[in-house]
Image (cartoon, rainbow, N blue to C red):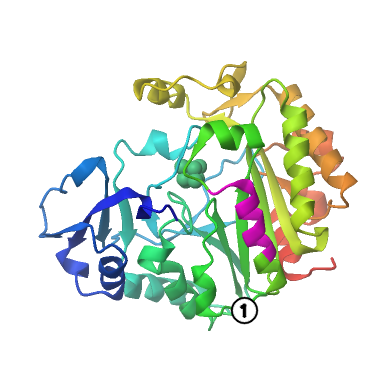
Amino acid sequence: MSGALWDITALAVDAAVADTAMAARARTALPQAQETALAPGDPLPTAPAGGRVLHIKAHKGRFLRPCPATRHYRCCGYQIIHIGENCPMDCSYCILRAYFRDKTLTAFANTGAMFAELAETFGRDISRPFRVGTGQFADSLALEPITGHTRELLGFLADYDNVTLELKSKTADLTWMAANPRPDRVLPAWSLNAPAIVAGQERDTAALETRLAAARTCAAAGFRVCLHFDPICFFAGWEREYAAIIDMIFDYLSPADIAYMSLGSFRCLPELPGRLTAEGRELPDYMLGEFAVGADGKKRLLRPLRVRQFRFMVAHLAGHGFSRGLYFCMESDEVWRAVFGHTPRELGGLAAYLLDCARNPGG
Ligand code: SF4
């Protein structure tokens, strides 16, 4: 976490969750933040000193949601537990920029309601396996030292042998380990990128070395980790840059430490470049190429270039002995075939394949 606790200078707590354990933890973690108790309908306060507001509130809708996909792209069957909204880090390619206009961070403190819903779903048939993550609209662990959300969730999941939880982050937070979860049911995961992209396009994220050192700590504790290259960006020198981070991975981890790894080429909602420009930021080179609009309405790099990116990554990873567990996020059968020579269906379906990679180390 940043030395300034992500510059959170205001804590707004809804009356409905004022007495929850999460609200109490947030008060303790943020003693310098100015607290406002919010009655229904009250506006959010403005954060002092140009900082951010952390809003602790109750979530009203469903907590468990399928990852958004379209029928045109192969989806990995992941389900997401909605724990909060927005992120204290700032990546130029982040989809949240197109979703949220302000910088308010939100954490849902009505975990009792969340666990009731999850118990009903996960307990209905305990022979049905689930692979779930947190943070569809947030980083899984960015606020963990403040909210303790994941530690609570891990305590609840101890009763559900059928659930594998992936914790995906660009921080190096390991405070969740205090919940002492089963190493075979938790997948700590890190998003990685080319060093030049991390340096120039990700603000306030942990250094690559720090992420990989955290992954190594998890592997030493018996966890298998997941890594995600998403977005892979196309810019002058991209091969050298992505080769460098792939080489770096294996300075910290062995192939057997990695459960699976996704590859996704840069794609964005068409309004993203305009949002960046409106913030006064220069558009990065990787956003200036030629794009086509895909079936999901997002701009994507032209297919031959995506295939070139993927072939390069797959070959370089294979050179380090890593092949099992590689998959694409949101790509078509055509791209699968062009790079891997097979489709997810020939693996038995992507969701089943990834569950197998997660649970059966040897394959
Ligand atoms: S860390 Fe993830 S959620 Fe946060 S700004 Fe970067 S891409 Fe967005």
Quadrant (top left, top right, bottom left, bottom right) of the N terminus? bottom left
Q: Disc count in the image?
A: 1
Where residue 99 sits: x, y (%)?
A: 38, 38
Whether residue 225 is situated above or below residue 43 in the rendered picture: below
Tell me the kind of residue under disc 1: Arg
Residue furthest to the bottom in view is 159
Residue at position x 46%, y 73% from top?
A: 151
Please give the residue where the numbered disc 1 appears in the rendered image: 182
- In the displayed structure image, the side of residue 48 where residue 343 appears, left or right: right
Q: Is residue 232 left or right of residue 91?
A: right
Q: Residues within 10 Å of mark 1 (few under 14, many from 20)?
A: some
x, y percentage for residue 353?
75, 59
What range of the chain is rendered magenta? Answer: 206-216
Q: Residue placed farthest to the front in the image?
A: 3
- Which residue is depicted at the point 61% across and 63% down? 188
Residue 68 at least partly seen: yes
Which quadrant is home to the C terminus? bottom right
Front residue of 73/44: it is 44
Q: Residue at x 60, y 23 (%)?
A: 286
Question: Dot 1: what SS?
Answer: loop
